Amino acid sequence: MINFPEIKSEIQFIQKNNEVELFLLREDLIHPEISGNKFRKLKYNLEAYFKGKYDSILTFGGAYSNHISATAAVGKIFKIPTIGVIRGEELIDKINENPTLSFAQSCGMKFKFVTRSAYRNKSDPAFLEELKSEFGNVYLLPEGGTNALAIKGTKEILHEKTKDFDYICSAVGTGGTLAGLINSAENHQITLGFPALKDSEFLHNEINQMAQGSDFELISEYHFGGYAKVKPELLEFINAFKQQFDVTLDAVYTGKMMFGIFQMINLGYFPKGSKVLAVHTGGIQGNQGMNQKLNFKNKKMII
């Protein structure tokens, strides 16, 4: 059994504007390679892995997946064989060109590249049985790492020092982190989720199935065109944020959330006197891949 230390990430004051105080919960500082919500999601899944005496962990993700990167790092640290089912057969001979995949491979992760149509079956029982037949006694982790044990972990993000805030904000991918925050939020706290996806209506039902509370809202205006899509004003904001507050944001999740919160404060969304806590969920490794794309297009990169 592995023993995890009790972790309570630090809270950093960002600004006071329009009589609204904004703070950042620095979950990104938990670990350089397994930071933020990825640590939280993997914590109890790792315990289940060791209790079940599995031979390896098998999970799913795209070419720049934070979850793939973190799972591979966990495998290296705890000497667990890991397998990544990766979306996109065309990537099979491009591992060295991709910072996320090359890092995961350096940690010992083995890959199975599948077509995008086949990848859509990632939750299908028949497809999962095929993977078990191919790879043996595997512990299955879904895309993004979100399952009941992951939500148990993300529930621990909030703690004694976060009780006085009025709003809890988080970026949203699969919804597991937001569900954990909803489950642990105080009765007076409102939880706001900022989806990274353009079409995020389905998330309401997904989150309602995972969360025990209903006092949350999805702020869907700040996806900047969709998952992993960026615009110059977002990149300018991320770089300015780094220079002013010495905090690196990523362009897929936390950068969009913070951009949205800043704009919402300026527009008077939050009542005067509110205390807002934004959760930095990590994911900084994704900036390498994003910069690779931006450099190829001769566009300004993330500092």
Image (cartoon, rainbow, N blue to C red):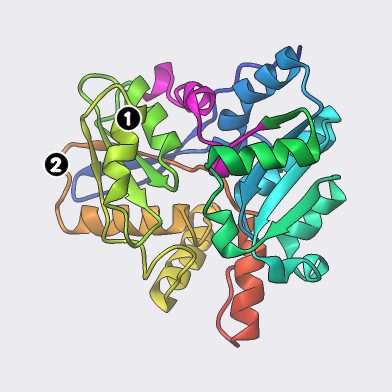
Q: Residues within 10 Å of mark 2 (few under 14, many from 20)?
A: few
Q: At x 60% / y 88%, what residue is drawn?
A: 298
> Against 228, is 85 above or below?
above
Residue ID for mark 1: 209
Does residue 145 show up magenta in the picture? Answer: yes
Could you tell me which secondary element the residue under label 2 belongs to? loop
Q: Position of residue 9 (x, y in %)?
A: 54, 29
> Against 43, is 270 above or below?
below
Residue ID for mark 2: 272
Amino acid type, residue under disc 2 in the picture: Lys
Indicate the quadrant where residue 282 lies: top right
Figure label count: 2
Q: Residue 5 vs residue 167: left or right?
A: right
Indicate the quadrant where residue 59 lies: top right
Q: Which of 253 and 62 lies nearest the eye of the viewer?
A: 62
User: Image quadrant for the C terminus?
Assistant: bottom right
Q: Which of 207 and 35 lies nearest the eye of the viewer?
A: 207
Work out how far the residue at label 1 is from the one at label 2, CA to CA, in angstroms. 33 Å
> Against 125, is 297 above or below?
below
Residue range corresponding to the magenta coloring:
140-162
Q: Position of residue 264 (x, y in %)?
A: 22, 55
Q: Position of residue 163 (x, y in %)?
A: 33, 21
Does residue 17 show up magenta in the picture? Answer: no
